Image (cartoon, rainbow, N blue to C red):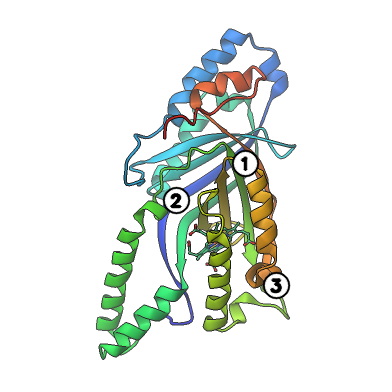
Amino acid sequence: MHNPFVPETVEGWSLLHQAFHLDWRALHALSSAERQAIAAEAAPLFARPPWRESGVGDVGQSILVQMLGHKGDLLLVHARRTFDELSQAQLDVAQTRLFELLVPASSYVSIVELGMYDMTAKIHGQLEERGLAAGSEPFDQAFDEELAIQARRMAPRLFPILPRRRQVCFYPMNKRRGEVKNWYAESFESRAAMMREHGHIGRQYAGRVTQIISGSIGLDDWEWGVDLFADDPLVFKKLIYEMRFDKASAEFAEFGPFYVGLQFDAAELGALLDGRTPALDTSTP
Ligand code: FEC
């Protein structure tokens, strides 16, 4: 059943964000050689996937982010095709010696999503023009076929190779469901117009930021996860500030904690354990 008031979504990677504190006291008790051995054992879990012109990832990927601030030291972002694979990624980390030095700080489960307000209205209109009755089996079948076409078209957005950009910002957020302001009580047209304005502002930042929106309704404590990747952290500040003025954010957005940090190469894990800022080689894709 396709409800014309509910924007259709197409889905991609299952995501698990894991934030950890490092147990510095335990690390300091180890020799540098031991720390390097621990890093070398864990590094293969964060191997870069082969670069593809299409930008579409294959089996999945896990990346490392050194976090700034007290909310954690290390953020792991796992992207996989299924929850089973995501669970294995979590267990693989738990099997390493590195894990014995990690203290869980936070985690977040979500699924990459593309919300399709304009497309939802368009498909409903087209199918009704073709004489298909909303709610009938042929209508639903034709709708599902159209969504499958959209999902194939959107594959680089749904299953992206995670951007190799140094600056990473992640936070969960909700659309307000208050007594006065309630996103879900707004008409479809009003929500669609606000999302158009939102997309318009976002596209002004094309090239400077790569955003991955994941949905987490029914999966975690907030409704969406927002991952942003950039070369300059100022871009996060300016983009998110500008968006505060768009109606969807000004009236309806509620934000969870922000996590920011620096993406780094698996080969640099030893540097982090030794207390040096780990680097990311961005000279190759
Ligand atoms: O109702 C929903 O579907 C809400 C899901 C949703 C949230 C969300 C929040 C943020 N976005 C941010 C950055 C960008 C940038 C672009 C962009 C575009 C879209 C489109 C949809 C969409 N965003 Fe969004 N965003 C959500 C959904 N956003 C749908 C339009 C279709 C598309 O292009 O994907 C431009 C992308 C581009 O280059 O084409 C950049 C940021 C936030 C959190 C801050 C805020 O004030 O909301 C930043 C939730």
Q: Quadrant of ligand 1?
A: bottom right
- The residue positioned 62% from the left and 75% from the top of the image is 183
At a point 57% along the width and 11% down the height, the residue shown is 34
**Disc 1, disc 3: CB below 8 Å?**
no
Q: Does 3 appear above or below 113?
A: below
The residue wearing badge 3 is 251
Type of amino acid under label 2: Ser
Secondary element type, mark 1: loop
Single out the mark in the foreground, 1 or 2.
Answer: 1
Query: Percent position (x, y) of residue 67?
Result: 65, 36
Q: Mark 1 touching mark 2, by CB under 8 A?
A: no
Q: Nearer the viewer, mark 3 or mark 2?
A: 3
Respond yes or no on whether mark 1 lies under 8 Å from ligand 1: no
Task: Pick whichever, 93 or 122, lies toward us.
Answer: 122
Which residue corresponds to mark 2? 14
In which quadrant of the rendered image does the C terminus lie? top left
Which label's residue is closer to the chain start, 1 or 2? 2
- Left or right placement of residue 62 versus residue 32 in this view: left
Q: Marks 1 and 3, how far apart in space?
A: 28 Å
**For this view, does 280 lie left or right of residue 88?**
right
Q: Amino acid at mark 3?
A: Glu
Tags 3 and 2 touching, CB below 8 Å: no
Mark 1 → mark 2, Cα distance in angstroms: 27 Å
Packing grade of label 3 (10 A; few <14, some 14-19, many >=20) is some
**Residue that mark 1 sits on:** 232
Image quadrant where one finds the N terminus: bottom left
How far, Cα to Cα, is label 3 from label 2? 29 Å
Q: Which circle's residue, 1 or 3, is located before the other in the chain?
A: 1
Identified by mark 1, the residue type is: Asp
Mark identifier at residue 256: none
260 to 266, vertically: above or below: below
